[in-house]
């Protein structure tokens, strides 16, 4: 599925991981899952990213969100690499599985190939898909091999997705948990009053269109 994008169902791949063989749909189950790729084992940016993801793993677990890494080396290489990752910042444990994909079959189907990074063969880019219980891609980040991701933003975006799904709202720019959310335009004022007992505020704008409505949710 080379064009995998928002709203697409991820393919139900059979994967070999550091935690044994899994089927992707079974792994996701009824939860949200974050699947994220790395160009290669024993590379500098990837090592810092895996260390940071390990640091955030407890936060994702508290939200019921699963983690699944991808790299194009084999399982034995992953297991040796994990020793470096955990030694880089002691106390951080890589408790999530990392998929072995030496023939690049999985990353091709998950749209995780970096067109500019060949190095003797296809390499993964820094792709990250947040997948919902319906197995559809809800959000994606795509970074080149040279640029490490911001795991705090991954967590913030996950919180935004969970809040939107739970309450039927949207989240404005720079939103963080606890801040006000916005009511989608398709929700009438009458429906909004019934759905949001704390009420809502409507921004006064030159257009006189009452579309920017803020409310608070738990």
Image: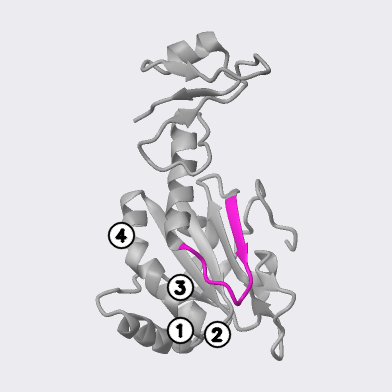
Whether residues under marks 2 and 4 lie with C-beta atoms below 8 angstroms apart, the answer is: no
Q: How is the image coloured?
A: one colour
| Residue position for label 2 | 73
Question: How far apart in space, not on screen, are marks 1 and 3 (Cα)?
Answer: 14 Å
Dot in front, 1 or 4 = 4
Please state, as top left, top right, bottom left or bottom right, where the C terminus lies in the image: top left
Circle 4 residue: 58
Mark 2 or 4, closer to the camera = 4
Of tags 4 and 3, the one toward the viewer is 3
Q: Give the vertical position of 12 relative to 32 (above or below).
A: below
Q: Secondary structure at mark 3?
A: helix
Q: From this view, report whether residue 71 is shown above or below residue 64.
A: below
Q: Circles 2 and 1: CB distance less than 8 Å?
A: yes
- Mark 2 vs mark 3, foreground winner is 3
Residue nearest the viewer, comparing 54 with 211:
211
Residue 75 position, x and y percent, is 47, 84
- Lower sequence index among marks 4 and 3: 3
Question: Tag 4: Cα neighbours inside 10 Å, few (<14), some, or many (≥20)?
Answer: few
Q: Calculate the distance from the C-alpha at mark 4 to the C-alpha at mark 3.
A: 15 Å
Decide: few, some or many residues near mark 1? Use Cα within 10 Å; few <14, some 14-19, many ≥20.
many
- Residue identifier under label 1: 78
Q: Sequence order check: which comes first, mark 1 or mark 4?
A: 4
Percent coordinates x, y for residue 134 in the rendering: 55, 44
Comes first in the chain, label 2 or label 4: 4
If you read the primary sequence from the N terminus, does the residue marked by circle 2 or circle 3 appear first?
Answer: 3
* Residue 48 position by quadrant: bottom left
Q: The N terminus lies in which quarter of the figure?
A: bottom right
The residue sitting at 44% across, 62% down in the picture is: 151
* Picture residue at 49% right of the left edge, 84% below the top: 44
In this view, the residue farthest toward the front is: 206
**Residue tagged by mark 3?**
49
């Amino acid at each position: 599925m080379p064009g995998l994008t928002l709203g697409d169902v991820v393919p139900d791949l059979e994967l070999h991981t550091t935690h044994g063989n899994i089927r992707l749909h079974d792994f996701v189950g009824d939860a949200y899952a974050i699947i994220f790729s790395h160009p290669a084992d024993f590379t500098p940016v990837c090592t810092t990213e895996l260390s940071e993801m390990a640091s955030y793993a407890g936060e994702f677990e508290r939200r019921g969100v699963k983690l699944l890494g991808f790299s194009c080396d084999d399982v034995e290489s992953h297991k040796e690499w994990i020793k470096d990752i955990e030694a880089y910042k002691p106390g951080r444990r890589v408790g999530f599985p990392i998929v072995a994909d030496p023939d690049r079959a999985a990353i091709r189907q998950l749209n995780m190939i970096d067109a500019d990074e060949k190095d003797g063969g296809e390499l993964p880019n820094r792709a990250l898909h947040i997948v919902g219980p319906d197995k559809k891609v809800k959000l994606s980040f795509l970074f080149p091999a040279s640029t490490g991701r911001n795991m705090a933003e991954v967590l913030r975006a996950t919180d935004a997705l969970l809040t939107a799904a739970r309450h039927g709202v949207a989240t404005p720019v720079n939103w963080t948990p606890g801040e006000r959310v916005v009511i989608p335009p398709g929700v009438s004022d009458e429906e909004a009053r019934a759905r949001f007992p704390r009420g809502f505020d409507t921004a006064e704008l030159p257009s006189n269109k009452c579309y920017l409505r803020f409310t608070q949710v738990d």
